[in-house]
Image (cartoon, rainbow, N blue to C red):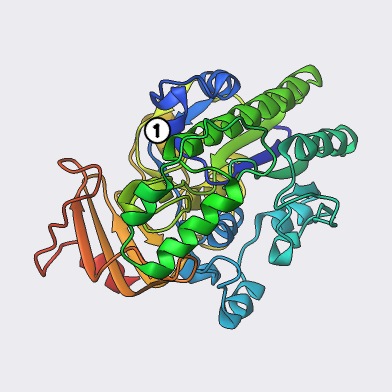
Amino acid sequence: MRRPNIIIIVIDAFRPDHMSLFGYEKETDTNLKKIARGGILFTNHFSVANGTAPAVTTILSGLIPSTHGIIHQFPYTKEEEYDKVEKIKFWLPSFLKEKGYETVCFDWLGEWFTKGFDYYKENEDEIEGLFAPTKMTVDLAISKIKNAKEPFLAFLHLWDTHFPFPNTPFKSSNADESNKILSGIEDGKYRDYVKKKMDAAKLYSVQDVIDKYDDTIKIIDHEIGRLYTFLKRDGLLDDTILVILGDHGDVIHEHGIYFATCGLFDGSIRAPLIMRLPSINGKVIDGMVQNTDIVPTILDFMGEKTVALDGKSLLPLIKEGRRVRNELLLFDAMANDVRAVRTYDKKLILAKDNFCNLCKTSHHNGTEEYDLLKDPGENDNIFSGKSELLKHLKSE
Ligand SMILES: [Zn+2]
């Protein structure tokens, strides 16, 4: 078999429930829907963390944050976390480069993410505002892929979906709910922070934030459609492993959290995942999977062996419907020390130090347990002092 090209597209802060593919009433995802129908759609995919730095490190390593070292999002990443990731035991770009792959990256993060890439596009101040516009990233990716020698790895990170969405034109409704939102926040420091965020985005109602977020998804969907058409026309599609996923979810207004991926509720950690594997397509997979599993799946598909990883190959699940995991470990990238374990029906969140570095407040308290079947919104803490799930957090 020819060695496949690999394209991984990460969409920042991407919630599945804002796609018609997952039942949303707005058609934000015309192209992604088409790609999913011709590929493999995972309906129960979760990130290992609610922040980009640990999540993307996991996507590229197949390791959980406590193994690869990066638990906290920038700028809360600690010295010892940097030291640990320096010695990471597996890194997909370096592994593939070793195997003769050309490796190109359009991620904009810099730091340790540059490792193993022949070409790495960093932000050189030509970008207005926070993040590279998706059109620019996709233009660059197409031009590099056109000239890449095969096989190649291309890694793209699309940022338009990240609050306050500076790249997306939007006509606000001018609705102003700011008093209602702010008066509902008890913590004064957090109230000031949320006010600052609304001012930065010039959005003063939850509905406006939702509508603008949906517009950013449409832009990303259009650009991915453009890349997909290019791959098809260039005859690259059938020899390429394509992975499209959110690095984590997002919270717009649930649980008293505004406009950030804070907390370990499902909103922050559930993310879309679509794959295309040469010769295995047209499947919908309901089994629970995590971004830790992407690297092991790619390696298994290629028939490559390496060091032991934390993730699991999803091929048995994709091909035979065999469940590959019953629980997920979750790491809070914003709070000092909050972790969780999630199964199909329960979630246990253990907040040893719940201070959120981003919001200067807290989103979890002590130990929380939720019955996800009876209470999918995670509103009713049923922790009674004992839980079957505690052992997972202790062993970790
Ligand atoms: Zn927070």
Outermost residue toward the left in this view? 384
> Percent position (x, y) of residue 162?
58, 46
Q: Callout 1: helix, strand or loop? A: loop
> Percent position (x, y) of residue 301?
58, 39
Residue drawn at x 78%, y 41% as measured from the top left? 152
Looking at the rendered image, the quarter that the N terminus falls into is top right
Type of amino acid at the residue the image marks with label 1: Thr
Q: Quadrant of residue 264?
A: bottom left
Asked if residue 138 lies left or right of residue 384, the reply is right
Residue drawn at x 41%, y 25% as measured from the top left? 24
Looking at the rendered image, the quarter that the C terminus falls into is bottom left
Q: Quadrant of residue 372?
A: top left
Residue drawn at x 53%, y 21% as measured from the top left? 33
> Percent position (x, y) of residue 386?
11, 68
- Number of numbered markers: 1
Name the residue nearer the viewer: 146 or 171: 171
Name the residue nearer the viewer: 310 or 146: 146
Is residue 320 visible in the rendered structure shown here?
A: yes
**Is label 1 within 8 A of ligand 1 (CB to nearest ligand atom)?**
no
Asked if residue 239 lies left or right of residue 357, the reply is right
Is residue 64 visible in the rendered structure shown here?
A: no
Quickly name the residue at label 1. 43
Name the residue nearer the viewer: 207 or 313: 207
> Percent position (x, y) of residue 287?
35, 37
Callout 1 crowding tier (Cα within 10 Å): few <14, some 14–19, many ≥20: many
Residue drawn at x 73%, y 51% as measured from the top left? 129
